[in-house]
Amino acid sequence: MAANIAVTTDQVGLVDPIKATVKTYKAASAVTIGQVVYLLTAGTVAPADGNGATALYTQVVGVALNAGGAGQSIDVCENGELYGFTVSGEDCGALLFLSDDVGRINDTTGTHTAYIGRVTCLTDASATKVMRVQVVFAQAFVA
């Protein structure tokens, strides 16, 4: 069953900041923590969606780690594990995709396929499931 992955914005954070790849961009428009963002030709980022008119020409770069308005700095996780996403009902290893809903992540592909990452399990006693952002830049253009 296709479903957007729920985000608890006050819990979004890096599992292991040392192993994560995070880059700071300027926002082209308002961005909310936990949203998938794409890179515009001006070098700024904005919330991405899988069915937008520009979806074939945009580059998904990761997940926003903070919120901000146009012109503000947005830290984006390009590669790493994140808390704050409700993936407990998903299988470990399940792929996650850009949703047709702006900025959201889904467990099935949107109109245009953009792979965002996968569900992974931590090594704690309960094998807590988290989202691993793993944007593959060469693949993010797939129609």
Image: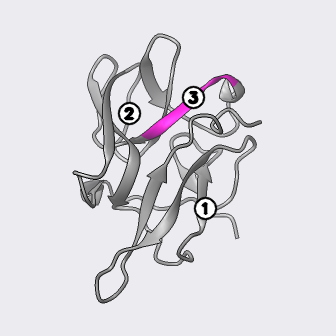
Quarter the C terminus occupies: top right
Residue 5 spot, x, y in % from top left? 51, 61
Q: Residue at x 71, y 27 (%)?
A: 56
Residue 35 spot, x, y in % from top left? 43, 43
- Spatial CA distance of label 2 from label 1 is 24 Å
- Of the residues tagged 2 and 1, which is closer to the observer? 1
Secondary structure of the residue carrying tag 2 is loop
Quick one: label 2 or label 1, which is nearer the N terminus?
2
Colour convention of the picture: one colour
Q: Residues within 10 Å of mark 1 (few under 14, many from 20)?
A: some
Confirm whether the magenta stretch covers residue 59.
Answer: yes
Q: In terms of secondary structure, what is the magenta stretch mainly?
A: strand
Query: Residue 140 or 89: which is nearer the viewer?
Result: 140
Residue 18 spot, x, y in % from top left? 22, 51
**Numbered tag placed on residue 134 in the rendering:** none
**Which amino acid, mark 1?**
Leu
Which of the 4 image quadrants contains residue 86? bottom left
Taking the image as shown, residue 72 lies to the left or right of residue 103, namely: left
- Spatial CA distance of label 1 from label 3 is 19 Å
Residue 114 spot, x, y in % from top left? 64, 43
Quick one: label 1 or label 3, which is nearer the N terminus?
3
The residue segment tinted magenta is 57-62
Residue at mark 3: 59
Residue at mark 2: 31
Residue at mark 1: 95
